[in-house]
Image (cartoon, rainbow, N blue to C red):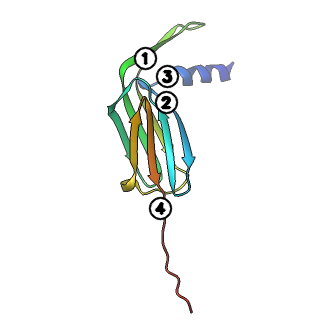
Amino acid sequence: MEIERRILKATWEHNGNLEPLYEVEDKGDEILVTFDLPRVRKENITIQTTEDTVEVTAKMSNAVCWEHWGVLQKKITFQAFRKHIKLPEPIEPERAEASFKSGILRITLPKVRKKVSIKVG
C-alpha cells in the first residue's frame, strides 16, 4: 500500500510543469536531443546549456487539465513543459543550434574535441 501512495504522490504533485517526451542520440561529433512539445510556439521556448547539461522550458499556448477519479478525486493543470538533462559527454554550448517545427524541437550540441600536438622524438 505504501508504494501505491508514493506513486500517486509522484504522479499528482507538481509545480505546473509537465515532463516532455525526449530522446538523446550520440551522432559521433555531436549529440542530438529531440523533444516533443505539442501546444507550444517557437517564441515560448527557452533553452539553457552548460558543458554537460541542457534544460528546456516551453510554455504551452493553452493549459492542459487532467482529472483523476478514484479513491481520491483530483484535478491538475499543466501550463509548461520543463526538462533538465545530464549529457553523456561534454559539449561546446556556444556552438549549439536548435530548430523547431510542427511541435518537434531538435537541439544539436557539438561535442568538445581537443586537439593535442604530439612531439615526435
Mark 2 vs mark 1, CA separation in Å:
13 Å
What residue sits right under mark 1 in the picture? 64
Q: Nearer the viewer, mark 3 or mark 1?
A: 1
Which element type, helix, strand or loop, lies under badge 3? loop
Q: Nearer the viewer, mark 3 or mark 2?
A: 2
Mark 3 vs mark 4, CA separation in Å:
38 Å
What residue sits right under mark 3 in the picture? 13
- The residue sitting at the left extreme is 43
Dot 4 or dot 1, earlier in sequence: 1
Q: Residue at x 35, y 38 (%)?
A: 46
The amino acid type found where label 1 is placed reads Val
In this rendering, is residue 15 above or below 29?
A: above
Which element type, helix, strand or loop, lies under badge 1? strand
Q: Are marks 3 and 1 in contact (CB under 8 Å)?
A: no
Q: On the rendered image, what quadrant is the N terminus found in?
A: top right
What residue sits right under mark 2 in the picture? 19
The tag on residue 112 is 4
- The residue sitting at the front extreme is 101
Q: Are marks 2 and 1 in contact (CB under 8 Å)?
A: no
Label 4 neighbour load within 10 Å: few <14, some 14-19, many 20+: some
Q: Nearer the viewer, residue 15 or 84?
A: 84
Q: Residue at x 50, y 43 (%)?
A: 33
In this rendering, is residue 90 above or below 57?
A: below
Q: Are marks 4 and 2 in contact (CB under 8 Å)?
A: no
In this rendering, is residue 77 above or below 32?
A: above
